[in-house]
Amino acid sequence: MKGDMETLADLSEEYRDSIPSDLRQTHSFDWYLEEVYEDPHIARNAHQRVADMFDYYGTEYDEDLGVVEYRLASEDPLNDGENTFYGRNIHESIHEFVNKVKSGARGLGPEKRIKLLLGPVGSGKSDFDRQVRTYFEDYTARDDGRMYTFRWTNLCDVIRDQDPADDVVRSPMNQDPLILLPLAQRDRVIDDLNDHLNAPYTIRNEQALDPASEFYMDRLLDHYDDDLQQVLENHIEIVRLVADENKRQCVETFEPKDKKNQDETELTGDVNYSKIAIYGESDPRAFDYSGAFCNANRGIFSGEELLKLQREFLYDFLHATQEQTIKPKNNPRIDIDQVIVGRTNMPEYKDKKGDEKMEAFNDRTKRIDFPYVLQYEEESRIYQKMLNNADVPEINVEPHTLEMAGLFGVLTRIEEPSGGTVDIVQKAKAYNGEIDDADDVDVKKLRDEASELAEIGEGMEGVSPRFIGDEIAEAIMDSMHRGRGFLSPLTTFNHLEGNLENHGSIPEDRFDRYYRYLEMVREEYKERAIEDVRHALAYDVDEIQRQGEKYMDHVMAYIDDDTIEDEITGREAEPDEQFLRSVEERLNIPEDRKNDFRQEVSNWVSRRAREGTSFNPQDNDRLRRALERKLWEDKKHNINFSALVSSGEMEDDERNAWIQALVEQGYSPEGAREVLEFAGAEVAKTEMED
C-alpha cells in the first residue's frame, strides 16, 4: 500500500516545479530593459498576449470548413480532455472570437470593442469564457507568456507624509515597467523592440502611469532633481506578474446585482476611506484600485450576463472600450489594457438591440454567436463527456441512446426545410455528414436557407443540452432503481417526453412541435434497432462477400456493355438487371439514379485495384448496407419474429446466439433482450400489415 502512496516530498517537488522560477524574485529596471531587448514579447499588450496564448497550446486547420480549431478547446490538454468542445458551430464561433482578438492585437479596431458572446442558455459560451480565463492563467505562468510589473520601494525615505505602512507600494494597475519611462524615451525603446520582434503585430504602449504612481514619480523626480536613473535604481523593483482569478489579478469577472445594490465603483474603484484621514480626500494615494476594470488590467475582463446591467452601468463601458480609459469618481482618469468579454442570452440581446438609447453601446460591441450544436453525433459527445466527468453507476449505455437524444435536441434547433426535397430528419442527417455522393442534398443551400428564415441565426433557439443531460441522468437513476443495468433509448425517450412541459425554458407554443420531433426520433431509432437485429439474425460474412462479388461482376458487365457467364448454365448472358436492382433498392436508389451508383462503386473498385487492395464489400459502407439488407430480405421469411417477443417460444441456444451477436455490437445482455423483443414486435407488425 505504501508503495502507491504519494509522499509529501514528491508533492512538494511537483508543486515547486509548477511555479515560475522567478515568481518571488525582484529585479532592477536595468535587468528588465535587457530582458525586453532579448525577448520583446514580454512587453505585449493584453490582446497580443491572449492571441498568442491560443496558438501556444496548438492549432489544427480544417480545410473543408476553413476554420482553425484551437487545442485548448478541441482537446483541453491541461485537463486531459475533460473540458473539450464539440460541434462545427462552436469551433466556428471560437475561430471568429480568436480572429477578433488577433485583429485587436494588430490595432485594427477590435481592441476597442467588447467581444459579446451571444447565444441561448447552455450553448457553451460561459464554458468557453471560463476556459479562456483558465488557460490565460496557465499561459502567464509559463516562460512564453511571462509578464512583469513593478513596485515602489523606500518611499518613506523621500516622501515625508508617506504612511509607513505604504513604504512599499505595488503598481496599483499592474502596469508594464516600460511605462515608467517618459513617453519620448519609451517610444524610442519600443521602436528598437519592434525592430527585433518576430510577430504579426508591433509593441505599443502610449499609456500614462496610474494616478498614484504618477504622484510618486513626480515627488521622487523632484527630490532627485529630475534624475530618472536615481528614481528607478533606488525606488523601483521589477516583479513577475501571473494572472490569477482568485486573487483578482489580471483576470476579473463581473456580474449584475440587484439594482439598488449595484454601484459603478464596483467597476472603476472608489475612495479608500481608511487612507483619507492620512492623505486627504483628493490625494491619489487615498484611492482604492479595487474596481473590476482595475483588477482585470493587463488581462481579461469577463462580464457575465452583461446586458442585464442597467443602462447607466453600460455607459461605463463606452470609455473602457473606445478610449481604453476609466473615469472613477474623485480620481483622475486611468488608462486600461484588457480584453473585455461579455456574455448574454437571447432575450436581453433582443431587448437592448431595439433600444435606440443603446446605439453607442451596441456600436462598441463585436457580436460572436454561440449557437447550439447542430450535428447530433457531436451533441452526443457532450452527453458522453457529462457521463465521463461524473460518478456514473455500473450501467451500460446501449447503442444509439446518446445519439438519438442528440438527434432530438438538434431537431428542435434547426429550421424546417422548405421545398419538400428533404424532411427535417434528413436535414439533421445531412448536417451530421450522412450524405452519400449520389444523394441530391445541398448542405450549403440548407444552411443559407436557414439563415434567411431564422431571426438571428440557426441554432440560437431550441432545447438546451442541459435539459437533455438532466433527463439522461434521471433515466440512469430510474434504471438503477428498477434493477436495470442498462440505459436504453426507450427509457430516455420516456423521460424526455414526460418532463418536456416541466422545463421552464421551453415555451408552451413549442410543446406540440417538440412532441412531433420526439416521435420522429422514435421512428429513426426503430429503424436502427431493426438494423441491429437484422445484423445479428442474418449476418453472414461469406454470403455478403459472395453476393458482393456477384454484384460487381454484373455491374462491370453492365458498364462495359458486355455479357457475363451464367452461374447455372455456363452460357453468356446479359447482366442480371433484376438482381442488380434487388441490391440497389435496399438503399432506395431510384431507377433514374442507378447508373450513378453503379459508376460510383465501379470507380471505387478500380481505385482499390490500382492500389493493390483486393475487393471487400465490407470496406464500402453503402454497398455493405445494401448487401446486408438484401440478405435480410432473403432470410427474414424463415424467422419467426413473433417468437422474438416471448423467450418461451424459442430455443435457448438460438436466442443466446442472437443475444451474443448484439452484445458484440455494444449491447448488454439485458439490453440485447429488450431490443430483440422491440425490433421483433415492430417487424412482426410490419409483416402482418404487408
Image: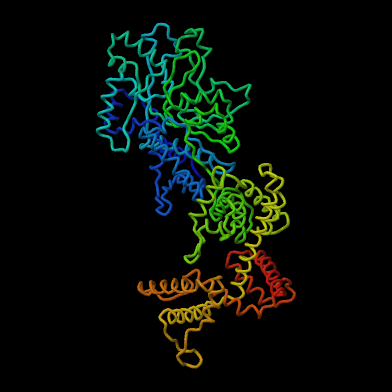
Please give left or right for residue 230 compared with residue 146 in the image: left
Please give left or right for residue 12 compared with residue 467 in the image: left
Residue 44: give x, y in percent of width and height: 35, 31
Taking the spot 54% from the left edge, 29% from the top edge, the residue there is 254
Taking the spot 67% from the left edge, 44% from the top edge, the residue there is 506
321 to 651, vertically: above or below: above
Residue 282: give x, y in percent of width and height: 47, 9
State the scheme by which the image is colored: rainbow
Residue 65: give x, y in percent of width and height: 43, 52
Q: Nearer the viewer, residue 411 or 295?
A: 411
Q: Nearer the viewer, residue 139 or 535?
A: 535
Q: Nearer the viewer, residue 591 or 326?
A: 591
Whether residue 488 appears in this view of the structure is: no
Q: Nearer the viewer, residue 270 or 446?
A: 446
Q: The C terminus appears in which quarter of the rendering?
A: bottom right
Quarter assignment of residue 489: bottom right
23 to 77, vertically: above or below: above
583 to 422, vertically: above or below: below
Whether residue 145 appears in this view of the structure is: yes
Residue 141: give x, y in percent of width and height: 41, 35
